[in-house]
Image: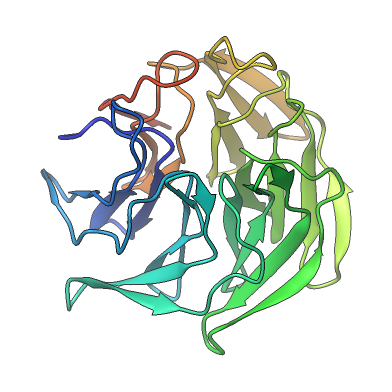
Amino acid sequence: MPLPRQEVASGALGDQALYVVGGFDPNRRSTADVQVFDGAWHVGPAYPFPVDHGVAAVTAGSLFVIGGNSNGRARADVYRLNVEAGRWEAVAALHHPRGAAGAAEVAGRIIVLGGTAAGVEVAAVESFDPGAGSWTDVGALPAPRDHVAAFNWLESACAAGGRSPNSARVDCLDPATGVWTRLPDLPHATSGAGAEVIGDQVVVAGGEDAGEAVIISVVARFRAGAWTEDAMHDPRHGIQLAGFRDRLWACGGAGVAGYAASAICTSIA
């Protein structure tokens, strides 16, 4: 990427473009930069305010960025990217401000899980209906935590890992029934990892250990009811995996525990 960033929000609009939004710069400052890859990197429309620890999600052909922190304060703001107009447009705000949350698209809605605000874990799970333009509280995360990695598995919204303390839990909510289930625990407790589904498998990549001192240097894959692991190329935390052109992309993050913003962008298949 042109600019090193960590604790970014990342998402893709089909095979057209990959977006990396905000994040900390190497001086630990929140940024409003939007970096876009569509075969080459270029600068996109600046986010309305500096943001780190936001989370991106795509539904109804639109990219949304949700919550996050701005200069240390958790935000409830949610913006949709108007690609044609080249600007971000505000939509309904979250009921519960939060940074370091996870988000997954399920049945056309965006489900937001976990996160933290003012040092308190946010338990409430919220669902965004893009047609109605509104949020609804749809349950509570059984073990509230932040820095979770979220994904859609079999039409359930799942939160993997997170802290504090660091966890290997994987909690999944079926928003149609309100029922929670658990997948087998991750092989390693991790926080600040990225997660997404590709083909018939869940991928959870990177993150930090329980002491926030060591990078988790593996990619965990869930398929056929069990987790396996392999080495991660350029291990990092503070990432969000984004599906783009048949691969999962990990852009930015930090290659050591704590603050060390990276410009690396690698992919996983």
Asked whether the viewer can see residue 72, the reply is yes
> What is the x, y in percent for residue 187?
73, 19
Front residue of 123 and 103: 123
Farthest-out residue, bottom: 132
Q: Quadrant of the N terminus?
A: top left
Residue 52 as seen in the image, left or right of residue 181: left
> What is the x, y in percent for residue 84?
18, 77
Q: How is the image coloured?
A: rainbow
Image point 36% across, 41% down: which residue?
A: 23
Q: Quadrant of residue 224?
A: top right
Q: Is residue 64 above or below residue 157?
A: below
> What is the x, y in percent for residue 221?
62, 28
Q: Quadrant of the C terminus?
A: top left
> What is the x, y in percent for residue 59?
47, 70
Q: Quadrant of residue 226?
A: top right
Front residue of 28 and 203: 28
Q: Is residue 110 above or below residue 41?
A: below
Asked whether the viewer can see residue 154, the reply is no
Image point 34% across, 55% down: which residue?
A: 12
Image point 30% across, 64% down: which residue?
A: 48
Image point 59% across, 70% down: which residue?
A: 94
Residue 24 as seen in the image, left or right of residue 130: left
Q: How many marks?
A: 0
Q: Is residue 193 above or below residue 256?
A: below
Q: Is residue 197 above or below residue 79?
A: above
Front residue of 89 and 173: 89
